[in-house]
Image: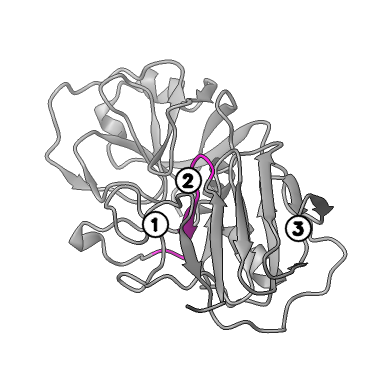
Amino acid sequence: MTDRALCVVRAGALTTVQDLGRPGHAHLGVPRSGALDGPAAALVNRLVGNAPEAAVLETTLNGCTVRPRSAVTVAVGGAPCHVTVDGRPVAWGAPVRVPAGALLDVGAAMSGVRSYVAVCGGIAVDPVLGSRSTDLLSGLGPPPLTDGAVLPLGRPTERHARVDVAPQPAPPAELVLRVTPGPRDDWFTPAAVRVFTSRVYRVSPASNRIGLRTEGPALERALTGELPSEGVVLGAVQVPPDGRPVVFLADHPTTGGYPVIAVVRSADLPAAAQTVPGTPVRFVAVRRR
């Protein structure tokens, strides 16, 4: 039994292992997956000296609690939260040394949705198709954390950053998503296209790692038929029969039969990972590049 491991004491609402994902397998029906808030995951990896591809923990809303079998350096970022070691407050957004057997508690998000926990050496579960990411849609990768699970850790380094503070963007009070129209915007009436890019929507509580669902005005279709299933990409804005846009996130299906009215710029998607239900959402049309 290796002492380079984390024991899960409290798994939280949904905590998964995530890295850079497994892009390039859409032709096999395999989603991209990976950390929803990529910049936050990259930052905590840098803070503990990990390579960019190292796997981290992604928590959802109420954090998690783990106990390392050996002393480790950790960093918590993403959604702001209280972090304690054996009940004592420690820094959020900076490297923290956790002794062997101590209890690291990542608290509930004070704002935003997802916090990221990096451990020096990375989470070393077995990779699948080159990635350690949990994929909720296909079931690839390790399952979501459960109480009592044991996660192996990689070889530690001593290259962690030495910082007083690592600035991170606050979760958005309003989510602004720049979109390129198409490929199926012609399946909607001109009035619906105007509504899509001028009215305010809100994040639905039904949102998850597969897609950010919205609540707001329904988009009227000009064509009433059904599309044959076709490929969809990260950031595609699909419109199901209820007319409310859905923004596809990391665990999205690789094909779909509902029309895609637009595609969100990839740079705007990390903010979508941190938007709580009820957050206003605006879609802003930009020219094709």
Expressed as whole percent of the image width and height from the top left, the position of residue 251 reads 36, 49
Q: Residue at x 18, y 46 (%)?
A: 230
Q: Nearer the viewer, mark 2 or mark 3?
A: 3
- Reply yes or no: does residue 18 show up in magenta: yes
Amino acid at the residue labelled 2: Arg
- The tag earlier along the polypeptide, 2 or 1, is 1
**In the picture shown, does residue 184 fall above or below 190?**
below
Task: Specify which label sits upstream in the sequence, 2 or 3.
Answer: 3
Residue 83: percent from left, percent from top = 74, 50
Asked if one can make out residue 250 in the rendered structure from this viewpoint, the answer is yes
Q: Quadrant of residue 191?
A: top left
Q: Is residue 52 left or right of residue 72?
A: left
Q: Residue at x 56, y 65 (%)?
A: 6
Disc ID at residue 134:
1
Dominant secondary structure (helix, strand or loop) of the stretch shown in magenta: loop
Which residue is the site of mark 3? 93
- The picture places residue 115, in percent across and down from the top left corner, at 62, 49
Residue type beneath disc 3: Gly
Q: Dot 1 lies on which element?
A: loop
Disc 3 crowd, CA 10 A, few/some/many (<14, 14-19, 20+): many
**The quarter of the displayed image where residue 22 is located:** bottom left
Gap between marks 1 and 3, in whole Å?
24 Å
Give the residues drawn in magenta, as a range. 12-21
Q: Residue at x 64, y 74 (%)?
A: 70
Q: Is residue 166 above or below residue 220?
A: below
In magenta stretch: residue 98: no
- Amino acid beneath label 1: Thr
Camera-nearest residue between 79 and 175 = 79
**Which disc number belongs to residue 287?**
2
Along the viewing direction, whichever of 81 and 100 lies nearer the viewer: 100
